[in-house]
Image: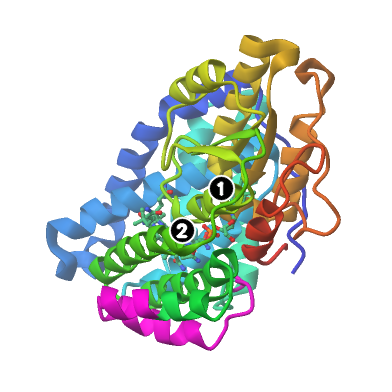
């Protein structure tokens, strides 16, 4: 199945209308859904309606980048993911495609002209590719080669056994492995497996949260056990863009820079664009690293870059982008690299170095030595 189709994109006014209509679309389609199929969902009680609303809202969140960038692949991937999550919880999936038709009908009646047609075409394309895929599983996320310790570490995380998790990591570091390698070959694969198990309904939300919390504290201890680097008088500012709550991967990137002697400021999850840019203006980093999990977070990347250019002009830092969305979809990676090279945006972002996973980062001047390894670690399916 080829997903590299390009669709028409919305005009700025079309996008504004789409955004303004989202909440009404969610309500209208949820009501239509319950009027037509309510009996199939009675067993879920009031929570069923709420979950349906959440799903409709999610559909539209994932539709937005299709409308903005013309690439259906991330939305199809999301639909396959959602179908697998629902199936694993014995929730019917047969109405998923219909909900896309109904969303199309809602927007067709309200956004006129070419823009209305763009929304309908995007929903149709996503629906068609989703149905073509049938019950095929979404391509698995590939993490770096797991070491044998990854399975033990995963078991410790799932059992909530912080002491054991720490012992495994300390053992690796004591046997001369670097923290970065342990993060890539033990911690990351364990977290990826736990994500897959949550998707398959084999692990609870609480276990996933516990695992993440333990992994983060173990990483801090690992950092303390690592040899102190010589400072190199360079600064990197790292942040997850607005909407991205997946922060552990970026923490690994932070550790990579710290251990290479950089001065690192790590702002963590979901950083508002204004706050991020304001901090960059004040702290004046040489490099800004942004983490992106889903395609709909790319406009936030664009906003950060535009604001850095506006506020700092030629004195702006280089920008590096990575994360799940960039690893997973090569077209988004290309788009991200292109984004910085548009003439109005001034100094281009260089292409990702050949040696790194395709598009997992866009990084200037070979300035980010070991972060390439961290980014490579996330190297997933590149479509
Ligand atoms: C823990 C977790 C969460 C936690 C995160 C807590 C935290 N403090 O970070 C919480 C509960 C918040 C969460 C929420 C959600 N999650 Co989640 N989550 C995970 C999980 C299990 C682990 C994430 C992680 O830490 N991975 C390990 C790190 C090391 O990997 P990484 O992020 O890819 O980072 C590496 C590279 O990508 C790269 N990198 C990352 N950032 C950057 C930046 C730069 C500059 C560079 C150079 C490189 C780089 O370097 C890192 C090291 O190699 C993953 C499973 C998975 N496969 O990752 C699911 C997963 C990512 N989540 C998923 C989903 C769907 C969600 C939610 C939508 C769920 C929901 N319905 O609410 C929300 C969305 C939140 C949001 N808006 O961002 C799905 C994504 C599905 C898909 N295929 O796209 C996954 C894959 C789980 C699954 N299998 O279903 N999640």
Query: In the picture shown, does residue 330 fall above or below 234?
Result: below
The structure residue drawn at horizontal position 49% and vertical position 60%, both measured from the top left corner, is 97
**Is residue 198 within the magenta segment?**
no
Q: In this view, does 69 lie to the left or right of 155?
A: right
From the top left corner, tell me how far across and down residue 92 is, in percent.
35, 72
Bounds of the magenta segment: 139-167
Give the residue at mark 1.
258
| Residue farthest toward the left in the current orientation of the protein | 45
Q: Which of 285 and 71 is in front in this view?
A: 285
Rate crowding at label 1 as few (under 14), some (14 to 19) or many (20 or more) other CA atoms within 10 Å: many
The structure residue drawn at horizontal position 62% and vertical position 37%, both measured from the top left corner, is 67
Cα separation between marks 2 and 1: 9 Å
Are the residues at dot 2 and dot 1 in contact (C-beta closer than 8 Å)? yes
**Is residue 150 within the magenta segment?**
yes
From the top left corner, tell me how far across and down residue 313 is, in percent.
71, 11
From the top left corner, tell me how far across and down residue 346 is, in percent.
80, 18
Q: Nearer the viewer, residue 100 or 204?
A: 204
From the top left corner, tell me how far across and down residue 233 is, in percent.
65, 33
Q: Is residue 341 left or right of residue 11?
A: right
The structure residue drawn at horizontal position 54% and vertical position 34%, both measured from the top left corner, is 108
Quadrant of res 163: bottom left
Secondary structure under tag 1 reads helix
Q: How many labels does the image show?
A: 2
Q: Is residue 336 left or right of residue 188?
A: right
Quadrant of the image for the C terminus?
bottom right
Number of the label disc, if any, that sits on residue 192: none
Number of the label disc, if any, that sits on residue 223: 2
């Amino acid at each position: 199945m080829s997903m590299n189709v390009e669709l028409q994109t919305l005009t700025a006014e079309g996008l504004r209308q789409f955004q303004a209509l989202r909440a009404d679309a969610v309500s209208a389609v949820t009501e239509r859904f319950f009027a037509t199929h309510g009996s199939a969902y009675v067993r879920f009680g009031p929570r069923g309606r709420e979950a349906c609303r959440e799903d409709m809202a999610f559909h539209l969140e994932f539709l937005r980048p299709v409308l903005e960038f013309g690439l259906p692949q991330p939305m199809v991937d999301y639909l396959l993911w959602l179908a697998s999550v629902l199936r694993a919880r014995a929730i019917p999936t047969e109405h998923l495609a219909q909900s896309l038709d109904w969303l199309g009908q809602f927007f067709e009646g309200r956004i006129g002209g070419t823009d209305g047609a763009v929304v309908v075409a995007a929903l149709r394309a996503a629906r068609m590719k989703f149905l073509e895929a049938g019950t095929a599983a979404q391509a698995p996320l590939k993490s770096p080669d797991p070491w044998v310790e990854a399975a033990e570490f995963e078991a410790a995380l799932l059992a909530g056994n912080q002491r054991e998790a720490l012992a495994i990591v300390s053992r690796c570091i004591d046997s001369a492995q670097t923290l970065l390698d342990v993060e890539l070959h033990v911690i990351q694969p364990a977290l990826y497996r736990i994500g897959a198990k949550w998707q398959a309904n084999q692990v609870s939300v609480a276990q996933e949260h516990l695992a993440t919390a333990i992994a983060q504290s173990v990483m801090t201890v690992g950092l303390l056990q690592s040899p102190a680097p010589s400072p190199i008088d360079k600064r990197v500012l790292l942040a997850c863009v607005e909407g991205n709550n997946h922060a552990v991967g970026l923490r690994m990137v932070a550790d990579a820079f710290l251990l290479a002697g950089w001065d690192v400021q790590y702002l963590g999850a979901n950083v508002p664009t204004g706050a991020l840019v304001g901090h960059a203006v004040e702290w004046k980093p040489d490099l800004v690293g942004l983490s992106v999990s889903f395609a709909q977070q790319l406009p936030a990347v664009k906003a950060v870059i535009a604001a850095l250019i506006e506020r700092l002009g030629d004195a702006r830092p280089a920008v590096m982008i990575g994360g799940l969305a960039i690893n997973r979809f090569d077209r988004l990676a290309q788009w991200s690299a292109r984004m910085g090279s548009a003439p109005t945006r001034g100094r281009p972002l260089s292409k990702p170095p050949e040696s790194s996973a395709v598009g997992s980062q866009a990084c200037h001047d070979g300035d980010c030595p070991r972060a390439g390894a961290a980014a490579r670690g996330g190297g997933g399916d590149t479509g």
